[in-house]
Amino acid sequence: MAIPKRRKVKAGPTKTVQPSPTRQRSAGGAPDGGVASWPLDAQPAGSFDFCRSLVRNVPDFPSKGILFKDITPLLANPKALHIVLDGIAERFIGEHVDAIVGIEARGFIFGGALAARLNASFVPVRKPGKLPAAVDRVEFHTEYSREALEMHKGSLHEGDRVVIVDDVLATGGTANAAASLVHGQGAYVIGYAFVIELSTLSGRERLLPTRVESCIVY
Ligand code: AMP
């Protein structure tokens, strides 16, 4: 088949794009905005400090009194994203993980990449009405509201070994609800993985004795 010719585009005025502060940080890699580099193999503990410096605190979002942990600056930094993904993946290498279950929405970002690193399948757990085929559903209470999560029926096999992934562990209610969907399909939760853990909300205690791994603890 012939390859279509490209249309000629009229040249417009040249625009000079200045590198943004985020881009400069990505290239330089120091939390203070300096130019020091952070080699990946240098100091894993220090590297998580670097990632922590890229989490933005947004007060009163989505509602008054909540200090929202915004991970978008961390995602925008390729080195930080790599450190977080490798940091979680290396804790489960050799553990025979069959599936990563990622919780909507930010759990998808980390879950999909982790599944690829661990040679596991990726299974999304979504808010009601988003998954197109037949679903299993679980309802649960958060501090302020009644919520529900869904997972496609037949996503997991009997005996599958599953890691549940989300961006933030707060009270543990969401992860716990995802676990009941996993158990409902006859699979095991061998661990939970979070980028951020808000330890004052005691989510870890709710999920124990199952293993809980997190990169940045507040
Ligand atoms: P929980 O069920 O209380 O553990 O809440 C966890 C879920 O709520 C995760 O999906 C998080 O993305 C979200 N979440 C809870 N608290 C925060 C927070 N302070 N900042 C960002 N996300 C949060």
Image (tube, rainbow, N blue to C red):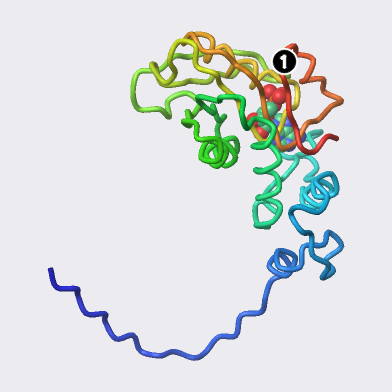
Residue 63 visible in image: no
Image mark count? 1
Instruction: Determine the quadrant in which ligand 1 lies.
Output: top right
Q: Is residue 82 above or below residue 129?
A: below
Q: Classify the position of the C terminus by image quarter.
A: top right
Q: Which residue lies at the image location 80% right of the left edge and 38% below the top edge?
A: 216
Helix, strand or loop status at disc 1:
helix
Q: In the image, 120: left or right of 45? A: left
* 109 on left or right of 191: left
Q: In the image, what residue occupies the spot 83% across and 67% down?
A: 36
Residue occupied by mark 1: 207
Q: Quadrant of the N terminus?
A: bottom left
Between residue 113 and residue 140, name the one nearer to us: 113
**For the view shown, which residue lies furthest in the front direction?**
94
x, y (%) of residue 112? Answer: 52, 39
Q: Is mark 1 within 8 Å of ligand 1?
A: no
Residue name at image x 65 percent, y 14 percent = 141
Rendered location of residue 210, percent (x, y):
70, 15
Q: Is residue 216 visible?
A: yes
- Position above or below: 64 against 39: above
> At 62% across and 32% down in the image, what residue appears?
93
**Vertically, is 26 above or below 192?**
below
Along the viewing direction, whichever of 213 and 21 lies nearer the viewer: 213
The x and y percentages for residue 52 are 81, 47
Q: Tell me which amino acid carries mark 1.
A: Leu
Q: Position of residue 48 (x, y in %)?
A: 80, 45
Residue 216 versus residue 142 in the image, above or below: below
Splitting the image into 4 quarters, where does residue 193 fall?
top right
Label 1 Cα neighbours within 10 Å, binned few <14 / some 14-19 / many ≥20? some
Asked if residue 200 lies left or right of residue 77, the reply is right
Q: Nearer the viewer, residue 20 or 48?
A: 48
